[in-house]
Image: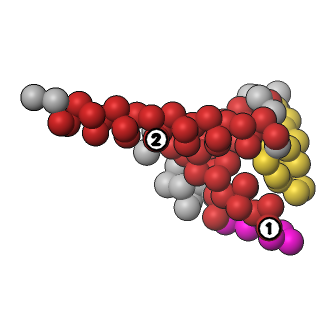
Amino acid sequence: MDNFSIIYRILRYLEKAMDYDEVDMDRISATTLKLSEQRWAAIMEMLTIEGYIDGMSIKRTLDGDVVLSVSTPRITLKGLEYLQENSLMKKAADIAKGITDFIP
C-alpha cells in the first residue's frame, strides 16, 4: 500500500473516531496497517508536523530515533480538508477513467 493510501486510512479513521469516546489506536497501528514501526512513526510524525492530526507529541532522541507520545489523537480541520479534497479528486479520476473507457 502506498504512503498516501495509508495517510488517507489514518485520517479517515480519525474522522470517524470523532463520534467515539476514545480512539482505538490499534485500528491505525503499524501492525494493522502492515507497516514497519519506523515507517508508521515517520508517517505519524509527518501528519503531526503538517497539522493534519494533533494530540501527539514527537521527540527525537540523540541517535535519531522518533519517540511518539499519544494522548488523545484527533483529526484537525486541515486533516478534514485533506480528506475532502482527496475524495473529490478520486471521484474526478474515476469519472475521467470511465470516460476514457468509452472512447475508442
Residue found 77% across the figure and 29% down from its top? 50
Nearer to me, 98 or 90? 98
Asked if residue 12 is positioned above or below residue 60 in the image, the reply reads below
The x and y percentages for residue 19 are 80, 67
Secondary structure predominantly adopted by residues drawn in magenta: loop
Quadrant in the picture for residue 38: top right
Nearer to me, 31 or 9? 9
Quadrant in the picture for residue 100: top left
Q: Which residue is mark 1?
A: 19
Is residue 14 something that shows in the picture? Answer: yes
The x and y percentages for residue 69 are 85, 49
Quadrant for the C terminus in the image? top left
Kindly identify the amino acid type of the residue bearing the numbered disc 2: Lys
Is residue 66 something that shows in the picture? Answer: no
Crowding near the residue tagged with mark 1, few <14, some 14–19, many ≥20 C-alpha atoms within 10 Å: few
Q: Mark 2 and mark 1: span between their CA atoms?
A: 25 Å
The mark found on residue 91 in the picture is 2
Magenta-drawn segment: 20-26
Quadrant for the N terminus in the image? top left
The x and y percentages for residue 88 are 55, 38
The x and y percentages for residue 62 are 82, 28
